[in-house]
Image (spheres, rainbow, N blue to C red):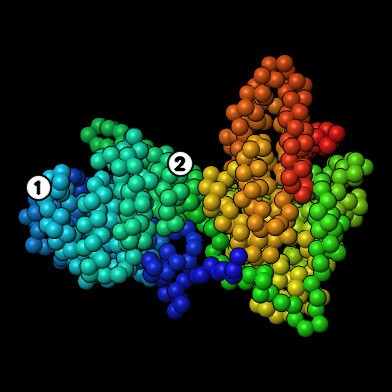
C-alpha cells in the first residue's frame, strides 16, 4: 500500500473555522445541529406560523436558537430555511420574499456561528408532486430551488443540505439547481418510513447509488422513523458507496400529549445510537425533529470521546529511514515473542486484567501459573471497557521484573495526548518492555464513569506510525533520538466487524503505518475467521487469534449483546443454552470445549493464540491449551 495521510486538525489553515469542504476532507466525524422547528415551537410559535418568515420578523430569536446549538458543540449549522422555497412561501403570500428570507437566514446563522461552526443552507421539498407523479414539471421545480439557492448564496453559506426528500427525482432537481449556481459541497438526505423505504418505495441502496452518480458530496437519511430506522439505513448505505454518510434521526416517534406532539427519545438514547451510527460508518451525525441542544451536546460528547482531535501525517513504512549511524532492530531480535513471530512459530499468550486496587499479588500468582504452563507471554489490557485499573505499562514492568515472563502491553490512545504518549512509550522502552499492542480504546461513556472525558489526540493508526518511527530512531517530528526503541508492534483487528470493508481499510493503514502483528477480537465463528484471513493474506502480517472460553450462558449472552466488536453465533448460544440446563459446571465445561475446538481449528491458519482469562480465572484459560 502506498503512503497516505489524514488531513486537518479541526481548524482551517488560518485558524478560522473550517469550511464544510474542509470538514468533509479531514476524515473525521462531525456533528450537525438539531431541530429549529422544535425549538421555535417550544417558544410559543405554533404550526400556523411561517417559521421561515421569522428570519425577518424575529431574527434575534432565530439567532439565539443557532447560538444554543453552537454552545452545545454543533460544528455545522443549518439555516432556518427548510420551507423557504417559492412554492411553500406562496401559501403565506411570501413567494416574492424568497431570496430575501433565505439571505437573511444565512446571515443570521453565520452571525450565530461567530467563527465556530460551518453554515449550510437548508433546502427541503417543495410540498408539490413533480412529474410523473404530479402536475409540477421538473423545470418548474428546478426554478423554485434555484431561487432559494440564490438567496442562501447571497447570505454566505459554506454549502447546502437538501433534506427530508421522499422523491429522489425531486431531490435531483434541487441538486441540479444548486450545482447550476455553485460548486460548494452538498449534503443530500432522503427520508424513509417504517418499512425502510422512501414514500415512493425507493430503498436506501438504490437512492444512495443514484445520489452518488448525480454528484452529491454527502449522502444521508434524516427525519424518518427515529434512530433505529436510520441506523438500519446507514448499515445498507455504507456498503454501496464511498461517499461520506450522514445520519440525522428524529428523537424517536412523536407522541400526542394533550394538544401537542412530544418526542420522547432522551439525549442519552440519541447519543447511544449516534455511537452505533458512527461504528456503522456515518461521518456526520446530528438530530432532526424533536432534538434540542441537550441532545446535540450528548452526541457531541460521545463523538469527542471516540474521534481524535487531530490526525498527524502518517508516513508509509516504506519511506521511513533511520538517520545515519542508526539501525532498526529486526523483529527477531526485539523480544522472545518477536523471535517466534519472525520464525513463523505459534505464539501463545493469555490476557490477564490488572487489579482495580493497588495489590499486585493476585496478578503475580496468575502470571506464575502461566509461566509454569509454558505460555509465551501475558497480555495486559489498558483500561478495558473504559474501567479504571492499575496502569498497563507499570503492571507489565512489575510482571516482567517479579515473574520473569514477557508481556504484551496494550496501550490505549484514549487517555493521553501526543506528548504523553511519546513520554510513555520512551519510558516503557527504557524499562525493558518490548511488545506493545496499540489500540484506540473504548470510549469513556461505555464505562462506569459517564462524566469522564477522553484526551484522544491520535488514534491507533497514528500511534502505530509514531512507534514505528521511534523504532527507527526518529521522533514524531523526524528528529533523531539516538538509540532506537525496539518494540514488536501489534494492532487490533476485528474479523466480525459490521462494516468489514471499512475495518480492512483501517487494517491496511495500520500495516502501512508499521504494524508487525495483529490480534483479533475473540473469535467464535471459524468460517468468519477463515474468510477474514483470506482477505488479509495480502498484507503478509502475522495474525494472533483471540479465543474466549465462555463461563456460562449469561457470559455468552453478554458478549453477544453488550461487547462491541464480538460476534457470538446462534449455534454457540444454543450449545451454551443447552449445557446450562445441566448446571454451572456443565455450562463451564461446554464453554471450554468450544474454546478448545476453536483452538484446534484456527492454530493451523494463524501465527498465534491469545486466550482470555475471564474474571481472572487462569485455570480456565489453561484448560484451553490442554
Camera-nearest label, 1 or 2: 1
Q: Secondary structure at mark 2?
A: helix
Q: Which mark is residue 135?
A: 1
Note whether residue 517 is visible: yes
Number of numbered discs overlaid on the protein picture:
2
Residue 121 on image: x %, y %? 27, 62
Residue 298 in view in this figure:
no
Question: What is the distance, in whole Å, between disc 1 and disc 2 at their CAs?
Answer: 42 Å
Q: Quadrant of the N terminus?
A: bottom right
List x then y, in percent, for residue 493.
64, 50
Kindly identify the residue that appears in the image at 40 percent across and 50 percent down. Answer: 247
The structure residue drawn at horizontal position 18% and vertical position 63%, both measured from the top left corner, is 146
In this orientation, which residue lies closer to the viewer: 370 or 107?
A: 370
Q: Quadrant of residue 4?
A: bottom right
Residue at image x 63%, y 70%? 316
Labels 1 and 2 touching (C-beta < 8 A): no
In the rendered structure, find residue 479 and report the number of the disc placed on it.
none
Q: Position of residue 621 (x, y in %)?
A: 80, 36
Quarter of the figure that contains the C terminus: top right
Above or below — where is 284 with respect to 329?
A: above
Outermost residue toward the top? 582
Label 1: element kind? loop
**Image position of 496 (left or right of 325):** left
Q: Is residue 534 left or right of residue 42?
A: right
* Viewer-closest of 536 and 574: 536
Task: Tell me the number on the disc at residue 269.
Answer: 2
Amino acid at each position: 500500500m502506498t503512503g497516505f495521510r489524514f488531513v486537518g486538525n479541526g481548524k482551517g489553515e488560518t485558524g478560522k473555522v473550517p469550511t464544510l469542504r474542509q470538514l468533509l476532507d479531514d476524515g473525521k466525524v462531525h456533528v450537525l445541529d438539531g431541530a429549529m422547528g422544535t425549538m421555535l415551537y417550544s417558544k410559543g410559535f405554533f404550526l400556523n406560523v411561517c417559521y421561515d418568515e421569522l428570519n425577518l420578523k424575529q431574527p434575534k430569536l432565530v439567532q439565539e436558537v443557532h447560538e444554543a446549538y453552537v454552545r452545545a458543540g454543533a460544528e455545522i449549522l443549518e439555516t432556518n430555511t427548510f420551507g423557504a422555497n417559492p412554492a411553500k412561501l406562496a401559501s403565506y403570500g411570501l413567494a416574492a420574499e424568497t431570496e430575501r428570507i433565505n439571505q437573511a437566514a444565512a446571515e443570521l446563522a453565520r452571525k450565530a456561528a461567530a467563527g465556530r461552526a460551518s453554515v449550510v443552507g437548508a433546502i427541503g421539498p417543495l410540498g408539490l408532486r413533480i412529474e410523473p407523479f404530479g402536475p409540477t414539471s421538473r423545470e418548474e421545480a428546478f426554478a423554485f430551488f434555484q431561487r432559494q439557492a440564490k438567496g442562501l448564496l447571497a447570505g454566505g453559506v459554506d454549502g447546502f443540505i437538501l433534506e427530508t426528500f421522499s422523491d429522489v427525482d425531486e431531490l435531483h432537481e434541487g441538486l441540479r439547481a444548486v450545482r447550476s449556481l455553485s460548486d460548494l459541497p452538498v449534503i443530500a438526505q432522503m427520508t424513509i418510513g417504517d418499512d425502510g423505504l422512501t414514500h415512493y418505495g425507493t430503498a436506501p441502496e438504490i437512492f444512495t447509488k443514484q445520489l452518488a452518480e448525480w454528484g452529491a458530496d454527502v449522502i444521508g437519511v434524516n427525519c424518518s422513523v427515529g434512530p433505529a430506522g436510520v441506523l438500519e439505513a446507514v448499515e445498507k448505505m455504507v456498503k454501496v458507496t464511498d461517499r461520506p454518510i450522514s445520519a440525522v434521526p428524529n428523537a424517536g416517534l412523536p407522541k400526542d400529549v394533550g394538544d401537542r406532539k412530544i418526542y420522547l427519545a432522551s439525549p442519552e438514547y440519541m447519543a447511544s445510537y449516534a455511537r452505533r451510527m458512527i461504528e456503522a460508518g456515518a461521518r456526520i451525525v446530528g438530530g432532526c425533529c424533536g432534538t434540542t441542544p441537550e441532545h446535540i451536546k450528548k452526541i457531541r460528547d460521545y463523538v469527542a470521546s471516540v474521534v481524535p482531535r487531530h490526525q498527524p501525517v502518517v508516513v508509509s513504512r516504506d519511506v521511513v529511514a533511520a538517520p545515519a549511524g542508526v539501525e532498526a532492530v529486526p523483529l527477531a531480535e526485539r523480544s522472545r515473542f518477536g523471535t517466534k513471530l519472525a520464525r513463523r512459530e505459534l505464539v501463545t499468550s493469555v490476557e490477564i486484567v490488572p487489579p482495580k486496587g493497588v495489590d499486585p499479588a493476585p496478578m503475580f500468582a496468575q502470571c506464575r501459573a502461566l509461566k509454569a504452563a509454558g505460555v509465551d507471554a501475558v497480555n495486559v489490557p489498558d483500561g478495558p471497557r473504559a474501567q479504571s485499573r492499575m496502569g498497563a505499562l507499570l503492571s507489565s514492568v512489575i510482571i516482567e521484573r517479579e515473574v520473569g515472563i514477557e508481556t504484551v502491553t496494550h496501550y490505549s490512545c484514549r487517555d493521553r495526548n501526543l506528548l504523553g504518549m511519546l513520554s510513555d512509550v520512551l519510558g516503557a522502552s527504557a524499562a525493558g518492555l518490548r511488545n506493545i499492542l496499540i489500540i484506540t480504546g473504548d470510549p469513556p461513556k461505555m464505562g462506569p464513569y459517564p462524566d469522564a472525558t477522553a484526551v484522544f489526540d491520535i488514534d491507533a493508526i497514528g500511534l502505530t506510525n509514531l512507534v514505528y518511527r521511534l523504532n527507527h530512531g526518529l521522533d514524531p517530528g523526524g528528529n533523531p533520538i539516538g538509540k532506537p526503541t525496539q518494540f514488536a508492534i501489534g494492532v487490533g483487528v476485528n474479523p466480525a466487524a459490521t462494516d468489514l470493508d471499512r475495518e480492512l481499510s483501517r487494517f491496511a493503514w495500520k500495516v502501512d503505518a508499521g504494524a508487525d502483528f495483529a490480534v483479533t477480537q475473540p473469535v467464535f465463528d471459524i468460517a468468519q475467521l477463515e474468510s477474514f484471513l483470506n482477505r488479509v493474506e495480502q498484507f503478509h502480517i502475522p495474525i494472533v487469534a483471540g479465543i474466549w472460553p465462555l463461563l456460562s450462558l449469561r457470559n455468552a449472552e453478554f458478549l453477544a449483546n453488550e461487547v462491541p466488536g464480538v460476534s457470538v453465533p446462534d449455534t454457540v448460544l444454543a450449545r451454551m443454552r443447552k449445557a446450562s440446563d445441566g448446571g454451572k459446571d456443565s455450562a463451564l465445561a461446554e464453554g471450554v470445549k468450544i474454546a478448545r475446538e476453536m483452538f484446534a481449528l484456527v492454530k493451523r491458519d494463524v501465527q498465534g493464540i491469545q486466550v482470555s482469562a475471564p474474571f481472572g480465572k487462569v485455570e480456565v484459560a489453561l484448560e484451553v491449551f490442554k
